[in-house]
């Protein structure tokens, strides 16, 4: 498929085509990143909640003087946690080819599996959007030109 064909809005593209295009770009665009889950995320958030509460208390802002401060602390602790975890994820990335070499995947089974997942998720996303599309015109009325 040519670039012009892939950009023709009058020609609907099948999920398989989109998945194939993305699979072609995987050697350049797909990376595996380090991601912390579960208790690690909770502990890091709790750490930042303690840091923020301590720093604010040192400046005269406490739960007694500011009864609604807990929401501020929780929100900002999440932001700091996500900043740390995103930074770690960005500095610890492996490209698809590197993962395939590490796994000894000489037949690119991993790439085929990823293509199949892409296709399936694209189909699901399209199906879910279509299921909600009838309600969109009313919801988008505020976007209409005056």
Image (cartoon, rainbow, N blue to C red):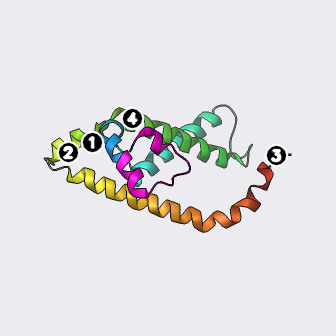
Nearest to N terminus: mark 4 or mark 3: 4
Quarter that holds the N terminus: top left
Q: Which residue is mark 1?
A: 96
Nearest to N terminus: mark 1 or mark 4: 4
Q: Which residues, given as a range, are shown in magenta?
A: 2-21
Q: Circle 2: is it few (<14), some (14-19), or many (20+) Cα within 10 Å?
A: some
Q: Quadrant of residue 135?
A: bottom right
Q: Which residue is mark 4?
A: 90
Q: Nearer the viewer, mark 3 or mark 2?
A: 3
| Residue 145 marker | 3
Side of 135 where 97 appears, left or right: left
Q: Are marks 4 and 3 in contact (CB under 8 Å)?
A: no
Q: Which residue is mark 2?
A: 100
Q: Secondary structure beneath disc 3?
A: loop
Q: Circle 1: is it few (<14), some (14-19), or many (20+) Cα within 10 Å?
A: some
**Separation of residues labelled 1 and 2 (CA atoms):** 6 Å
**Separation of residues labelled 4 and 3 (CA atoms):** 41 Å
Residue furthest to the right:
146
**Separation of residues labelled 3 and 2 (CA atoms):** 51 Å
Q: Give coordinates of residue 10: x percent, y percent.
A: 56, 51
Q: Secondary structure beneath disc 1?
A: helix
Q: Are marks 1 and 2 in contact (CB under 8 Å)?
A: yes
């Amino acid at each position: 498929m040519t670039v012009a064909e892939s950009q023709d809005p009058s020609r609907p593209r099948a999920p398989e085509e989109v998945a194939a295009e993305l699979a072609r770009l995987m050697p350049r665009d797909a990376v595996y990143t380090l991601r912390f889950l579960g208790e690690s995320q909770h502990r890091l958030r709790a750490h930042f909640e303690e840091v923020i509460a301590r720093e604010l208390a040192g400046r005269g802002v406490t739960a007694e003087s500011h009864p609604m401060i807990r929401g501020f602390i929780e929100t900002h602790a999440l932001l700091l946690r996500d900043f740390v975890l995103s930074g770690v994820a960005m500095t610890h990335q492996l490209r698809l080819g590197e993962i395939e070499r590490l796994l000894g995947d000489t037949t690119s089974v991993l790439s085929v599996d990823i293509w199949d997942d892409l296709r399936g998720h694209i189909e699901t996303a399209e199906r879910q959007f279509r299921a909600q599309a009838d309600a969109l015109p009313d919801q988008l009325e505020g976007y209409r030109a005056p």
